[in-house]
Amino acid sequence: PTDPLVLFMPSGKRGRFPVGTNLLEAARLLGVNIESVCGGRATCGRCQIEVQEGGFAKHGIVSSCDHISPKSGREARYESIRSLPVGRRLSCSATIQGDLVVAVPQDAVVNAQVVRKAASDRLIERNPAVRLCYVEVDKPDMHKPLGDLDRLKAMLTRDWGIHDPAVPLRLLPQLQKILRKKNWGVTVAIHHDDNGARPEILAIWPGLHNKAYGIACDIGSTTIALHLLSLLSGRVVASSGVSNPQIRLGEDLMSRVSYVMMNPGGCEAMALAVREAVNGLIGQVCTESGVDAGDILDAVFVANPIMHHLFLGIDPTELGQAPFALAVSGAIHASAAELGLQANEGAHVYLLPCIAGHVGADAAAATLAEGPHRQDRMMLLIDIGTNAEIVLGNGQRVITASSPTGPAFEGAEISSGQRAAPGAIERVRIDRETLEPRFRIIGSELWSDQPGFPEDAVRLGVTGTCGSAIVEVVAELYLCGIVSEDGAIDGALAARSPRIVANGRTFSYLLHDGCPQITVTQNDVRAVQLAKAALYAGIRLLMEKQGVAAVDMIRLAGAFGSFIDPKYAMVLGLIPDCDLSEVRAVGNAAGTGAMMALLNRDCRREIVQTVQRIEKIETALEPHFQQLFVDAMTLPHKVDSFPNLVK
Ligand code: FES
């Protein structure tokens, strides 16, 4: 008779095993990641699974709870002390007795949040670089005078297959006490990144220590966002964000580079400011979740090249001028202690590789999250900030460029522009006949012409226009004929509508006649034209390099990209024509990529290999770029058409 068939869900991995095979062992053999801290002693409870009942015709399996061994004495003991949810079993203490469909609970394999955000069709299995291993070390024996550490290492090899890990000197003075405290049972945190480096012991605790956390952090020039994740379950336990305090030393990236150039000690001050902010966030997420910072064992950071260098204390001056030389482009392995971060003394830090002098580890992380390199079809991934980072490709070839969009989309250089915050106008519609506007502000569910809006307007204030509204209002002005194809506000319409007002030698559109008055000036329209032309020209250049006339799907990442309406982005000619159902906002894709790299060391290898084969296009060196830019100044474009908008 053939051996029973065991299918693990949700991964779908399956295999045949002889009756009596340990279920955790079977999972391991198939490469299904089920956590175990205690090494199968039925004490940590991390290896829980659920048996699915019934017939699974598609797989030719009839699964039943009778096909798994009954609860053993040690499993029953665990249940009486710690309790098990109904239907859950400890896979380390169960054996296969017949065909089985086994569900590995989502929180034990997959970070549901990561999967949801990544919009990826694959599951991110948890396989972190740091794991906890419980061992029971032999007591010392006068006849076998092997040191305590050497006997500990022998157990790590025997029980966990870990060979000769490196041990930092700082752990040795504490070792003997720790080993004796809980009768020679200890939990060891091992870091093994699979990058060819030796495994390393990060920390040792007496007895069973069942807690391990990591942080994933996106250091943006405007905002720093940090997530605290359990490395054992993969769940995000707390998240927080703060304005980048470097803003007080320089509003945008180039002014921060200038600050470093002009001020002795400026680089150190920048590094300190951002590290203190990160520590502040770690403090916040730990307090919120009740996690001890000493249990943070790993950290992944992503950032644009200048932020990346400033976080590491590297002078970014070279990045401010051609040829935009990075001090280091590869992935970085460091210790939290070196960076002064609040975490376990032995915690590791990993920074994703930078792609080029203008395309940073944040773009690498967004690439990891959205996976253009995993697609059959052509994917365009755009992260819009002061620079737009553009990635275009598929499984065959991925190319990237950055384009200087300037700060218009972030609300800067726009007369009534502001960052997205309560009170900022975020949506705009203009009546085609009357040319009267209606709008929505952040913090209110109502349009400005709906009952109840005046109360919201008083409560929140109507303070300015954020990036998404700037795109919409210029697109609406164009659709109404107030703004022409070349971007001029038509002053002749002033006779028809009081909304068109003279402003020196040009005209403005009065969007909100309140306090403050919010207008869209001719200069605002020009700033949007320049920004969108830079972005579109960058995209068009990459499309030419790829030899494609259209893209199959578009992913808009980052704070700005996530809020713009794809339809208006296309009306304005910000993005190329594409089936609108294939245009998707993906939120902070860089942060998602950081979480993936934290939870799964294979993701680190994947992005390092991908970055090596991404081709970098330097827009400034492309003679053709200027022409593409000029063509893209027209609304929506001088020559390109947008058939998907007409549909
Ligand atoms: Fe620890 Fe099963 S592996 S309880």
Image (cartoon, grey):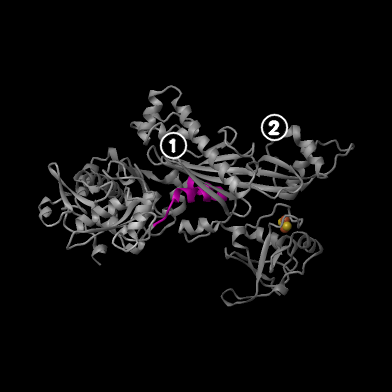
| Number of the front mark, 2 or 1 | 1
Q: Please identify the quadrant where the C terminus is shown.
A: bottom left
Q: Nearer the viewer, residue 391 or 224?
A: 224
Does the magenta portion include 207?
no
Q: Is residue 530 left or right of residue 367?
A: left
* Residue 155 rendering spot, x and y as whole percentages: 76, 45
Considering only vertical position in the picture, is 370 above or below 3? above
Residue 527 visible at all: yes
The magenta region covers: 585-608
Along the viewing direction, whichever of 481 and 364 lies nearer the viewer? 481
Q: Quadrant of the N terminus?
A: bottom right
> Tag 1, which secondary structure?
helix
Nearer-the-camera pick, 228 or 21: 228
- Ligand 1's quadrant is bottom right
Q: Residues within 10 Å of mark 2 (few under 14, many from 20)?
A: few
Whether residue 380 is visible here, answered yes or no, is no
Real-space Cα separation, disc 2 to disc 1, in angstroms: 31 Å
